[in-house]
Amino acid sequence: MLNFFSKRKPRPVSATAILQVLDQSAKAFVFPMLDNGYVYLAASRMSAFRSDDHWAVVFEIFGFSPRAGFPDLSIVTIASELSNRNRPEDYVSEEAYKNYLKNKPNWEFRTVWPISNDDLIDPDNAEQLARLSRINLRDEILEQPEKADYDTANISLSEDGPAIVELCRYLAHARRRAVLATEAERRVSITPEMKQIILLDEWHHPDLVKGQLPSKNKTFQSLATVLEKNDPSFYDASEPANNHWKNWPDGGSL
């Protein structure tokens, strides 16, 4: 006789399946490329989430793209199940909406703007900082950094400096929490029942330009095991961390 009140067994979460999804996201140019030629990297962070049935990996990438025109924080979520997806009415047709779901089955991308100055950028040079007196960062009003502040953060100013990217990197040094995601922002595409099981400020990131996939990277192999076992003690940090912007000099070079 069936017991309809018996507890449902969780679906198994497989490290192999997780790595397959991470590789697919890399091949679809969704998995973050820290030396993205269009983005000057300033700060990054990664977290992992788990529920009984599902998993998620979230990347936070703060930087500056001259093509986008303003510093921003990209939140990339790769997961077995996603929440708060785009709405059908956001698309010109039902077919376009179906293509969105088909082309992004396991990943979502959201953007946050931690800096809110309207006068941040020099009107004559889209990559240079305007001569503004203060910077609006989240709920803080900051004085513009002096050269000595940049020196303390080991940031060399350009000849025309300070550049927008140099300000971003200084803020990532001095106000890291403010330029990265709040808990609510980090969970923007995460289903409510998921719990954060690991948060990493440093890790060894694969060099996608050289064809390195997440599944061949010891960091992400161990992260997949963390998610499978729902246990952060399986994380392997033996490879040297390389996600700092200084390790990706080609970022923003296009």
Image (spheres, grey):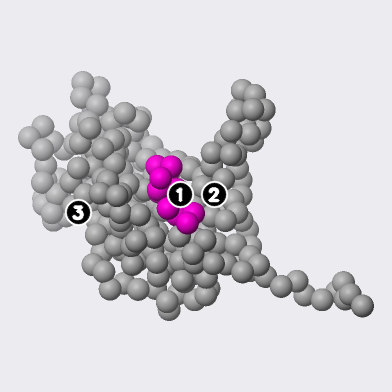
| Secondary structure under the numbered disc 2 in the rendered image | loop
Which quadrant of the structure image shows residue 190? bottom right
Q: Quick check: marks 1 and 2 in contact, CB under 8 Å?
A: yes
Residue 24 disc label: 1
For image coordinates 41% across by 45% down, the residue present is 27
Q: Nearer the viewer, residue 36 or 120?
A: 36
Q: Is residue 184 visible?
A: no
Write the start and end of the magenta stretch as one range: 20-31
Query: Does residue 45 lie above or below 128 as drawn?
Result: below
For image coordinates 52% across by 75% down, the residue present is 229
Q: Nearer the viewer, mark 1 or mark 2?
A: 1
Figure quadrant of the C terminus: top left
The reply, left or right, for residue 65 in relation to residue 235 is: left
**Which amino acid type corresponds to the residue marked 1 in the rendered image?**
Gln
Residue tagged 2: 106
For image coordinates 26% across by 69% down, the residue present is 239
Q: What separation in Å lies between label 1 and label 2 (alpha carbons)?
A: 9 Å
The reply, left or right, for residue 247 in relation to residue 208 is: left
Query: Does residue 192 lie above or below 239 as drawn?
Result: above
- Residue 72: image location, x then y, percent: 37, 40
**Which amino acid type corresponds to the residue marked 3 in the rendered image?**
Asn
Q: What separation in Å lies between label 2 and label 3 (alpha carbons)?
A: 28 Å
